[in-house]
Image: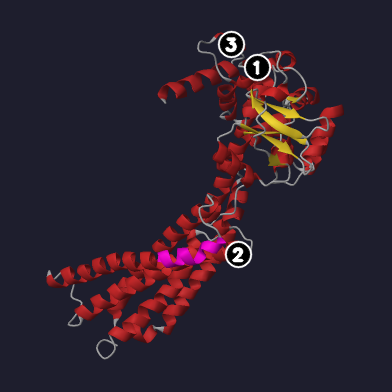
Amino acid sequence: MKLKETRLVYLKELLLGGKYESIQSEKPSFHPSEIANAIHSLPDNEQVKAFQVVDKSIWINVFEYLGYDSQQNLLSQLSDDEIAIILTKMSPDDRTVLFSQLPGLELTKYMNLLHGEDKAEAHDLLGYAKNSIGRLMNTDFFSFRHDITISKAIEQIRAEGKDNETLNMIYLTDAEGKLIDDIPLRRLLLHSPDKMMSEIMDHSFIRLNVNDKNEDAIKVFKEYDRVALPVVDDENILLGIVTIDDVLDVVEESDTQDIQKFGGVESLDMPYAKTPLFELVKKRAGWLVILFLSEMLTATAMGFFEDEIAKAVVLALFIPLIISSGGNSGSQAATLIIRAMALREITLKDWWKVMRKEIFSGLMLGGVLGSIGFLRILIWQNLYLYNYGEHWFLIGLTISFTLVGIVMWGTISGSMIPFALKRFKLDPATSSAPFVATLVDVTGLIIYFTVASIILKGTLL
Protein backbone atom coordinates (compact mmCIF):
# COMPACT_ATOMS: atom_id res chain seq x y z
CA MET A 1 0.00 0.00 0.00
CA LYS A 2 2.84 2.40 0.84
CA LEU A 3 4.51 1.63 -2.50
CA LYS A 4 1.26 2.36 -4.31
CA GLU A 5 0.79 5.67 -2.48
CA THR A 6 4.41 6.69 -3.15
CA ARG A 7 3.96 5.85 -6.82
CA LEU A 8 0.80 7.98 -6.93
CA VAL A 9 2.56 11.00 -5.38
CA TYR A 10 5.46 10.60 -7.80
CA LEU A 11 3.08 10.42 -10.76
CA LYS A 12 1.28 13.61 -9.69
CA GLU A 13 4.62 15.42 -9.48
CA LEU A 14 5.50 14.31 -13.03
CA LEU A 15 2.11 15.40 -14.39
CA LEU A 16 2.17 18.81 -12.74
CA GLY A 17 5.79 19.24 -13.85
CA GLY A 18 4.87 18.53 -17.47
CA LYS A 19 7.24 15.57 -17.65
CA TYR A 20 5.23 13.09 -19.67
CA GLU A 21 8.38 11.68 -21.25
CA SER A 22 9.44 10.55 -17.78
CA ILE A 23 6.06 8.90 -17.30
CA GLN A 24 6.46 6.96 -20.56
CA SER A 25 9.96 5.78 -19.68
CA GLU A 26 9.02 4.68 -16.16
CA LYS A 27 9.51 0.97 -15.44
CA PRO A 28 7.08 -0.55 -14.71
CA SER A 29 5.03 1.76 -16.90
CA PHE A 30 2.04 3.62 -15.53
CA HIS A 31 -1.33 2.17 -16.46
CA PRO A 32 -4.00 4.63 -17.73
CA SER A 33 -6.04 3.88 -14.59
CA GLU A 34 -3.10 5.04 -12.43
CA ILE A 35 -2.82 8.26 -14.44
CA ALA A 36 -6.58 8.78 -14.11
CA ASN A 37 -6.41 8.19 -10.36
CA ALA A 38 -3.59 10.74 -10.05
CA ILE A 39 -5.55 13.33 -12.03
CA HIS A 40 -8.72 12.67 -10.05
CA SER A 41 -6.88 13.27 -6.75
CA LEU A 42 -5.75 16.75 -7.86
CA PRO A 43 -7.71 19.96 -7.19
CA ASP A 44 -10.16 20.85 -9.97
CA ASN A 45 -8.06 23.75 -11.25
CA GLU A 46 -5.02 21.48 -11.72
CA GLN A 47 -6.74 18.52 -13.35
CA VAL A 48 -6.81 20.04 -16.84
CA LYS A 49 -3.15 21.00 -16.66
CA ALA A 50 -2.22 17.43 -15.71
CA PHE A 51 -4.52 15.89 -18.34
CA GLN A 52 -3.06 17.98 -21.16
CA VAL A 53 0.43 16.71 -20.28
CA VAL A 54 -0.69 13.19 -21.19
CA ASP A 55 -0.02 12.10 -24.76
CA LYS A 56 -3.17 12.37 -26.87
CA SER A 57 -2.76 8.77 -28.01
CA ILE A 58 -3.95 7.57 -24.60
CA TRP A 59 -6.25 10.49 -23.76
CA ILE A 60 -9.33 8.39 -24.27
CA ASN A 61 -8.01 5.52 -22.11
CA VAL A 62 -7.29 7.90 -19.24
CA PHE A 63 -10.55 9.82 -19.66
CA GLU A 64 -12.70 6.68 -19.50
CA TYR A 65 -11.10 5.70 -16.17
CA LEU A 66 -11.96 9.05 -14.58
CA GLY A 67 -15.02 9.51 -12.38
CA TYR A 68 -17.95 11.53 -13.69
CA ASP A 69 -17.11 14.64 -11.66
CA SER A 70 -13.56 14.76 -13.04
CA GLN A 71 -14.81 14.08 -16.56
CA GLN A 72 -17.28 16.95 -16.32
CA ASN A 73 -14.59 19.23 -14.89
CA LEU A 74 -12.27 18.48 -17.82
CA LEU A 75 -15.01 18.96 -20.40
CA SER A 76 -15.85 22.37 -18.95
CA GLN A 77 -12.25 23.55 -19.46
CA LEU A 78 -11.00 21.81 -22.61
CA SER A 79 -11.45 23.35 -26.07
CA ASP A 80 -14.22 22.13 -28.38
CA ASP A 81 -11.66 20.44 -30.63
CA GLU A 82 -10.15 18.56 -27.70
CA ILE A 83 -13.61 17.53 -26.46
CA ALA A 84 -14.57 16.33 -29.94
CA ILE A 85 -11.48 14.08 -30.05
CA ILE A 86 -12.41 12.52 -26.70
CA LEU A 87 -16.13 12.04 -27.38
CA THR A 88 -15.55 10.60 -30.85
CA LYS A 89 -13.06 8.01 -29.62
CA MET A 90 -14.97 7.02 -26.46
CA SER A 91 -16.60 3.61 -26.49
CA PRO A 92 -20.35 4.01 -27.13
CA ASP A 93 -21.37 2.57 -23.75
CA ASP A 94 -19.06 4.85 -21.73
CA ARG A 95 -20.15 7.85 -23.79
CA THR A 96 -23.80 7.02 -23.13
CA VAL A 97 -23.16 6.83 -19.37
CA LEU A 98 -21.48 10.24 -19.49
CA PHE A 99 -24.22 11.83 -21.62
CA SER A 100 -27.00 10.43 -19.45
CA GLN A 101 -25.65 12.36 -16.44
CA LEU A 102 -25.19 15.72 -18.17
CA PRO A 103 -27.65 18.63 -17.80
CA GLY A 104 -29.75 19.34 -20.89
CA LEU A 105 -27.80 22.33 -22.25
CA GLU A 106 -24.43 20.62 -21.82
CA LEU A 107 -25.74 17.45 -23.45
CA THR A 108 -26.91 19.41 -26.49
CA LYS A 109 -23.55 21.19 -26.76
CA TYR A 110 -21.50 18.00 -26.61
CA MET A 111 -23.88 16.07 -28.85
CA ASN A 112 -23.35 18.72 -31.55
CA LEU A 113 -19.60 18.06 -31.43
CA LEU A 114 -20.26 14.55 -32.77
CA HIS A 115 -20.84 13.92 -36.46
CA GLY A 116 -22.38 11.32 -38.71
CA GLU A 117 -22.69 7.80 -37.36
CA ASP A 118 -21.32 8.72 -33.92
CA LYS A 119 -24.04 11.31 -33.39
CA ALA A 120 -26.79 9.01 -34.65
CA GLU A 121 -25.50 6.19 -32.46
CA ALA A 122 -25.43 8.44 -29.36
CA HIS A 123 -29.03 9.52 -30.03
CA ASP A 124 -30.16 5.91 -30.42
CA LEU A 125 -28.50 4.71 -27.20
CA LEU A 126 -29.88 7.62 -25.18
CA GLY A 127 -33.33 6.68 -26.45
CA TYR A 128 -33.42 3.54 -24.31
CA ALA A 129 -34.90 3.61 -20.80
CA LYS A 130 -32.55 4.94 -18.12
CA ASN A 131 -32.02 1.65 -16.26
CA SER A 132 -32.15 -0.62 -19.31
CA ILE A 133 -29.47 -2.77 -20.90
CA GLY A 134 -29.64 -0.50 -23.95
CA ARG A 135 -27.92 2.30 -22.00
CA LEU A 136 -24.99 -0.04 -21.17
CA MET A 137 -24.68 -1.45 -24.67
CA ASN A 138 -21.44 -1.20 -26.66
CA THR A 139 -21.85 -1.34 -30.43
CA ASP A 140 -18.15 -2.11 -31.05
CA PHE A 141 -18.02 -5.90 -31.41
CA PHE A 142 -17.30 -8.60 -33.97
CA SER A 143 -20.11 -10.45 -35.67
CA PHE A 144 -19.94 -12.67 -38.74
CA ARG A 145 -22.28 -14.50 -41.02
CA HIS A 146 -22.34 -18.19 -40.26
CA ASP A 147 -21.52 -19.05 -43.89
CA ILE A 148 -17.92 -17.72 -44.00
CA THR A 149 -14.69 -19.58 -43.30
CA ILE A 150 -12.70 -19.39 -40.08
CA SER A 151 -9.70 -18.00 -41.96
CA LYS A 152 -11.74 -15.09 -43.32
CA ALA A 153 -13.06 -14.29 -39.82
CA ILE A 154 -9.55 -14.35 -38.32
CA GLU A 155 -8.27 -12.13 -41.13
CA GLN A 156 -10.94 -9.53 -40.37
CA ILE A 157 -10.27 -9.69 -36.63
CA ARG A 158 -6.56 -9.05 -37.23
CA ALA A 159 -7.35 -6.10 -39.48
CA GLU A 160 -9.98 -4.39 -37.32
CA GLY A 161 -9.61 -5.74 -33.78
CA LYS A 162 -6.96 -3.39 -32.41
CA ASP A 163 -9.38 -0.98 -30.69
CA ASN A 164 -12.10 -3.52 -29.91
CA GLU A 165 -13.08 -3.62 -26.22
CA THR A 166 -13.35 -7.39 -26.01
CA LEU A 167 -12.10 -10.08 -28.38
CA ASN A 168 -12.68 -13.20 -26.33
CA MET A 169 -16.07 -13.84 -27.94
CA ILE A 170 -17.42 -13.40 -31.47
CA TYR A 171 -21.04 -13.64 -32.61
CA LEU A 172 -22.66 -15.38 -35.56
CA THR A 173 -25.76 -14.12 -37.34
CA ASP A 174 -27.95 -15.29 -40.19
CA ALA A 175 -28.71 -13.33 -43.36
CA GLU A 176 -31.24 -11.16 -41.46
CA GLY A 177 -28.80 -10.18 -38.70
CA LYS A 178 -30.40 -12.46 -36.10
CA LEU A 179 -28.12 -13.93 -33.46
CA ILE A 180 -27.68 -17.67 -33.87
CA ASP A 181 -24.58 -18.41 -31.78
CA ASP A 182 -21.61 -17.04 -29.85
CA ILE A 183 -18.19 -18.59 -30.25
CA PRO A 184 -15.12 -18.22 -28.00
CA LEU A 185 -12.10 -17.03 -29.94
CA ARG A 186 -10.12 -20.06 -28.79
CA ARG A 187 -12.54 -22.30 -30.71
CA LEU A 188 -11.53 -20.58 -33.96
CA LEU A 189 -7.87 -21.15 -33.19
CA LEU A 190 -8.39 -24.84 -32.43
CA HIS A 191 -10.11 -25.66 -35.74
CA SER A 192 -8.87 -25.78 -39.29
CA PRO A 193 -8.95 -22.35 -41.03
CA ASP A 194 -10.75 -23.95 -43.99
CA LYS A 195 -13.79 -24.91 -41.94
CA MET A 196 -16.98 -22.91 -42.22
CA MET A 197 -18.13 -21.02 -39.11
CA SER A 198 -21.38 -23.01 -39.19
CA GLU A 199 -19.36 -26.22 -38.66
CA ILE A 200 -18.07 -25.16 -35.23
CA MET A 201 -21.38 -23.86 -33.88
CA ASP A 202 -22.99 -25.51 -30.87
CA HIS A 203 -26.19 -23.41 -30.89
CA SER A 204 -25.82 -22.78 -27.15
CA PHE A 205 -25.62 -19.13 -26.15
CA ILE A 206 -26.85 -16.63 -23.58
CA ARG A 207 -28.30 -13.25 -24.58
CA LEU A 208 -29.87 -10.16 -23.08
CA ASN A 209 -32.79 -8.14 -24.41
CA VAL A 210 -32.12 -4.48 -25.05
CA ASN A 211 -35.08 -3.55 -22.82
CA ASP A 212 -34.05 -5.75 -19.87
CA LYS A 213 -33.29 -3.94 -16.62
CA ASN A 214 -29.74 -3.61 -15.35
CA GLU A 215 -30.54 -5.96 -12.47
CA ASP A 216 -31.27 -8.71 -15.01
CA ALA A 217 -27.82 -8.32 -16.53
CA ILE A 218 -26.20 -8.54 -13.10
CA LYS A 219 -28.01 -11.79 -12.40
CA VAL A 220 -27.06 -13.35 -15.77
CA PHE A 221 -23.40 -12.34 -15.52
CA LYS A 222 -23.22 -13.82 -12.03
CA GLU A 223 -24.96 -17.04 -13.07
CA TYR A 224 -22.92 -17.74 -16.20
CA ASP A 225 -19.53 -16.16 -15.29
CA ARG A 226 -19.25 -14.24 -18.55
CA VAL A 227 -17.16 -11.16 -19.35
CA ALA A 228 -19.45 -10.06 -22.19
CA LEU A 229 -22.96 -10.89 -23.34
CA PRO A 230 -24.76 -10.13 -26.64
CA VAL A 231 -27.76 -7.80 -26.68
CA VAL A 232 -30.70 -8.38 -29.03
CA ASP A 233 -34.07 -6.75 -29.72
CA ASP A 234 -37.46 -8.46 -29.53
CA GLU A 235 -36.85 -10.01 -32.96
CA ASN A 236 -33.46 -11.42 -31.92
CA ILE A 237 -31.53 -8.93 -34.10
CA LEU A 238 -28.02 -8.51 -32.69
CA LEU A 239 -27.56 -4.88 -31.57
CA GLY A 240 -24.45 -4.86 -29.37
CA ILE A 241 -22.77 -6.31 -26.31
CA VAL A 242 -22.61 -5.55 -22.60
CA THR A 243 -19.28 -6.05 -20.84
CA ILE A 244 -18.60 -6.98 -17.23
CA ASP A 245 -16.85 -3.69 -16.40
CA ASP A 246 -20.03 -1.75 -17.11
CA VAL A 247 -22.09 -4.18 -15.06
CA LEU A 248 -19.70 -3.81 -12.11
CA ASP A 249 -20.16 -0.02 -12.30
CA VAL A 250 -23.93 -0.55 -12.09
CA VAL A 251 -23.50 -2.87 -9.09
CA GLU A 252 -21.33 -0.32 -7.30
CA GLU A 253 -23.77 2.51 -7.97
CA SER A 254 -26.77 0.44 -6.93
CA ASP A 255 -25.13 -0.78 -3.71
CA THR A 256 -24.04 2.76 -2.84
CA GLN A 257 -27.57 4.09 -3.27
CA ASP A 258 -29.03 1.25 -1.19
CA ILE A 259 -26.55 1.81 1.63
CA GLN A 260 -27.27 5.55 1.64
CA LYS A 261 -31.03 4.98 1.67
CA PHE A 262 -30.74 2.39 4.39
CA GLY A 263 -28.85 4.92 6.50
CA GLY A 264 -31.69 7.43 6.14
CA VAL A 265 -30.08 9.57 3.42
CA GLU A 266 -31.33 10.33 -0.09
CA SER A 267 -28.87 8.89 -2.60
CA LEU A 268 -26.13 11.37 -3.51
CA ASP A 269 -25.75 12.45 -7.14
CA MET A 270 -21.95 12.64 -6.88
CA PRO A 271 -19.19 11.38 -4.55
CA TYR A 272 -19.36 12.60 -0.95
CA ALA A 273 -16.12 14.58 -1.22
CA LYS A 274 -17.45 16.49 -4.23
CA THR A 275 -20.99 17.07 -2.94
CA PRO A 276 -21.58 20.75 -2.02
CA LEU A 277 -22.42 21.43 1.63
CA PHE A 278 -25.92 22.74 0.92
CA GLU A 279 -26.72 19.72 -1.26
CA LEU A 280 -25.44 17.36 1.44
CA VAL A 281 -27.63 19.03 4.08
CA LYS A 282 -30.61 18.92 1.72
CA LYS A 283 -30.17 15.19 1.11
CA ARG A 284 -29.99 14.44 4.84
CA ALA A 285 -32.51 16.92 6.26
CA GLY A 286 -35.64 15.26 4.86
CA TRP A 287 -35.19 11.95 6.63
CA LEU A 288 -33.97 13.61 9.82
CA VAL A 289 -37.10 15.76 10.00
CA ILE A 290 -39.34 12.74 9.36
CA LEU A 291 -37.55 10.69 12.00
CA PHE A 292 -37.59 13.58 14.47
CA LEU A 293 -41.33 14.05 14.07
CA SER A 294 -41.79 10.30 14.43
CA GLU A 295 -39.73 10.25 17.62
CA MET A 296 -42.10 12.86 19.05
CA LEU A 297 -44.58 10.02 19.27
CA THR A 298 -42.26 8.51 21.88
CA ALA A 299 -42.89 11.46 24.16
CA THR A 300 -46.61 11.16 23.46
CA ALA A 301 -46.54 7.46 24.33
CA MET A 302 -44.71 8.18 27.58
CA GLY A 303 -47.37 10.76 28.43
CA PHE A 304 -50.01 8.03 28.47
CA PHE A 305 -47.99 6.18 31.14
CA GLU A 306 -47.18 9.22 33.26
CA ASP A 307 -48.96 7.83 36.30
CA GLU A 308 -47.12 4.50 36.08
CA ILE A 309 -43.76 6.29 35.85
CA ALA A 310 -44.65 8.48 38.84
CA LYS A 311 -45.54 5.44 40.93
CA ALA A 312 -42.52 3.38 39.91
CA VAL A 313 -39.71 5.75 38.91
CA VAL A 314 -37.36 2.78 38.69
CA LEU A 315 -39.08 1.77 35.45
CA ALA A 316 -37.72 4.90 33.75
CA LEU A 317 -34.17 3.66 34.30
CA PHE A 318 -34.66 0.87 31.79
CA ILE A 319 -36.40 2.80 29.00
CA PRO A 320 -33.21 3.42 26.94
CA LEU A 321 -32.19 -0.22 27.36
CA ILE A 322 -35.60 -1.52 26.32
CA ILE A 323 -36.20 0.62 23.23
CA SER A 324 -32.62 0.36 21.93
CA SER A 325 -32.78 -3.44 22.08
CA GLY A 326 -35.94 -3.43 19.98
CA GLY A 327 -34.49 -0.96 17.49
CA ASN A 328 -31.28 -2.94 17.15
CA SER A 329 -33.07 -6.22 16.53
CA GLY A 330 -35.32 -4.54 13.95
CA SER A 331 -32.36 -3.02 12.14
CA GLN A 332 -30.64 -6.41 12.05
CA ALA A 333 -33.69 -8.08 10.53
CA ALA A 334 -34.22 -5.31 7.97
CA THR A 335 -30.58 -5.51 6.87
CA LEU A 336 -30.73 -9.27 6.37
CA ILE A 337 -34.03 -9.21 4.47
CA ILE A 338 -33.14 -6.30 2.18
CA ARG A 339 -29.86 -7.94 1.23
CA ALA A 340 -31.57 -11.29 0.64
CA MET A 341 -34.08 -9.54 -1.62
CA ALA A 342 -31.30 -7.82 -3.55
CA LEU A 343 -29.60 -11.20 -4.12
CA ARG A 344 -32.98 -12.72 -5.06
CA GLU A 345 -32.66 -15.30 -2.31
CA ILE A 346 -36.24 -14.52 -1.26
CA THR A 347 -39.28 -13.09 -3.06
CA LEU A 348 -42.65 -11.69 -1.99
CA LYS A 349 -44.18 -15.15 -1.82
CA ASP A 350 -41.69 -16.09 0.91
CA TRP A 351 -43.10 -13.57 3.40
CA TRP A 352 -44.74 -16.16 5.65
CA LYS A 353 -41.64 -18.35 5.71
CA VAL A 354 -39.61 -15.30 6.73
CA MET A 355 -42.11 -14.20 9.38
CA ARG A 356 -42.20 -17.64 10.93
CA LYS A 357 -38.41 -17.76 11.09
CA GLU A 358 -38.20 -14.24 12.56
CA ILE A 359 -40.81 -15.02 15.22
CA PHE A 360 -38.70 -17.88 16.53
CA SER A 361 -35.50 -15.84 16.08
CA GLY A 362 -37.06 -13.01 18.05
CA LEU A 363 -38.15 -15.32 20.83
CA MET A 364 -34.69 -16.82 21.20
CA LEU A 365 -32.83 -13.51 20.89
CA GLY A 366 -35.26 -11.90 23.30
CA GLY A 367 -34.76 -14.80 25.68
CA VAL A 368 -31.01 -14.26 25.65
CA LEU A 369 -31.31 -10.50 26.31
CA GLY A 370 -34.11 -11.04 28.83
CA SER A 371 -31.96 -13.46 30.80
CA ILE A 372 -29.07 -11.01 30.83
CA GLY A 373 -31.41 -8.20 31.93
CA PHE A 374 -32.79 -10.29 34.80
CA LEU A 375 -29.26 -11.33 35.89
CA ARG A 376 -28.19 -7.70 35.87
CA ILE A 377 -30.94 -6.76 38.34
CA LEU A 378 -30.27 -9.88 40.42
CA ILE A 379 -26.54 -9.19 40.72
CA TRP A 380 -26.87 -5.44 41.33
CA GLN A 381 -29.49 -6.06 44.04
CA ASN A 382 -27.56 -8.77 45.88
CA LEU A 383 -24.19 -7.01 45.68
CA TYR A 384 -25.82 -3.80 46.92
CA LEU A 385 -24.74 -1.92 43.80
CA TYR A 386 -28.28 -0.56 43.49
CA ASN A 387 -31.42 -1.03 45.58
CA TYR A 388 -34.46 -1.81 43.44
CA GLY A 389 -36.64 -2.23 46.52
CA GLU A 390 -38.52 -5.14 47.95
CA HIS A 391 -40.16 -5.92 44.60
CA TRP A 392 -36.88 -6.27 42.69
CA PHE A 393 -37.77 -9.78 41.56
CA LEU A 394 -40.97 -8.55 39.86
CA ILE A 395 -39.04 -5.70 38.27
CA GLY A 396 -36.56 -8.25 36.92
CA LEU A 397 -39.40 -10.31 35.47
CA THR A 398 -40.88 -7.18 33.89
CA ILE A 399 -37.61 -6.32 32.18
CA SER A 400 -37.06 -9.92 31.09
CA PHE A 401 -40.51 -10.46 29.57
CA THR A 402 -40.50 -7.00 27.97
CA LEU A 403 -37.21 -7.72 26.22
CA VAL A 404 -38.61 -10.97 24.83
CA GLY A 405 -41.67 -9.15 23.50
CA ILE A 406 -39.95 -6.09 22.11
CA VAL A 407 -37.07 -7.98 20.45
CA MET A 408 -39.56 -10.32 18.79
CA TRP A 409 -41.64 -7.33 17.68
CA GLY A 410 -38.47 -5.66 16.36
CA THR A 411 -37.46 -8.67 14.27
CA ILE A 412 -40.98 -9.03 12.87
CA SER A 413 -41.23 -5.32 12.01
CA GLY A 414 -37.76 -5.14 10.50
CA SER A 415 -38.37 -8.19 8.32
CA MET A 416 -41.90 -7.38 7.18
CA ILE A 417 -41.53 -3.68 6.30
CA PRO A 418 -39.31 -4.48 3.27
CA PHE A 419 -41.95 -6.94 2.06
CA ALA A 420 -44.69 -4.31 2.44
CA LEU A 421 -42.67 -1.73 0.49
CA LYS A 422 -41.84 -4.27 -2.20
CA ARG A 423 -45.53 -5.19 -2.46
CA PHE A 424 -46.40 -1.57 -3.22
CA LYS A 425 -43.53 -1.36 -5.76
CA LEU A 426 -41.33 0.83 -3.56
CA ASP A 427 -37.63 0.41 -2.89
CA PRO A 428 -37.17 -1.89 0.16
CA ALA A 429 -33.95 -0.04 1.00
CA THR A 430 -36.06 2.93 2.10
CA SER A 431 -37.14 0.88 5.09
CA SER A 432 -33.96 2.24 6.62
CA ALA A 433 -32.56 1.25 9.97
CA PRO A 434 -33.49 4.64 11.50
CA PHE A 435 -37.09 4.24 10.32
CA VAL A 436 -37.40 0.74 11.78
CA ALA A 437 -35.74 1.88 15.00
CA THR A 438 -38.16 4.80 15.35
CA LEU A 439 -41.17 2.56 14.82
CA VAL A 440 -39.97 0.08 17.43
CA ASP A 441 -39.12 2.88 19.88
CA VAL A 442 -42.72 4.07 19.98
CA THR A 443 -44.37 0.66 20.08
CA GLY A 444 -41.70 -0.62 22.47
CA LEU A 445 -42.83 1.81 25.18
CA ILE A 446 -46.36 0.52 24.87
CA ILE A 447 -45.14 -3.07 25.21
CA TYR A 448 -42.95 -2.15 28.18
CA PHE A 449 -45.59 -0.41 30.27
CA THR A 450 -48.28 -2.93 29.33
CA VAL A 451 -46.10 -5.77 30.65
CA ALA A 452 -45.23 -3.69 33.72
CA SER A 453 -48.88 -2.95 34.49
CA ILE A 454 -49.65 -6.69 34.37
CA ILE A 455 -46.71 -7.97 36.44
CA LEU A 456 -46.47 -5.09 38.94
CA LYS A 457 -50.19 -4.59 39.46
CA GLY A 458 -50.98 -4.50 43.18
CA THR A 459 -47.36 -3.91 44.15
CA LEU A 460 -45.61 -0.90 42.62
CA LEU A 461 -48.55 -0.07 40.32
**Coloring scheme used:** secondary structure
Residue 423: mark: 2
In this image, 286 relative to 176: left or right?
Answer: left
First along the sequence among labels 3 and 2 = 3
Calculate the distance from the C-alpha at mark 3 to the C-alpha at mark 2.
Answer: 56 Å
- Residue at the outermost bottom position: 458
The amino acid beneath tag 1 is Val
Magenta region's main secondary structure?
helix
Residue hosting label 1: 53
Residue 336 in percent (x, y) is at: 45, 55
Mark number, residue 24: 3
Which mark is nearer the camera, 3 or 2?
2
* Quarter occupied by the N terminus: top left
Q: Nearer the viewer, residue 364 or 71?
A: 364
Residue range in magenta is: 348-358
The residue at 79%/34% (across/down) is: 122
Q: Residues within 10 Å of mark 2 (few under 14, many from 20)?
A: few
Using a 10 Å C-alpha cutoff, classify the residue at mark 1 as few (fewer than 14 neighbours), some (14 to 19) or many (20 or more): some
Left or right: residue 210 compared with residue 457: right
Q: Nearer the viewer, residue 136 or 208?
A: 208
Instruction: Work out how far the residue at label 2 is from the one at label 1, CA to CA, in angstroms.
Output: 54 Å
Left or right, residue 387 beside residue 428: left
| Residue kind at label 3, given as amino acid type | Gln
Residue at screen point 18% across, 71% down: 378
Mark closer to the observer (2, 1): 2
Task: State which tag comes first along the sequence, 3 or 1.
Answer: 3
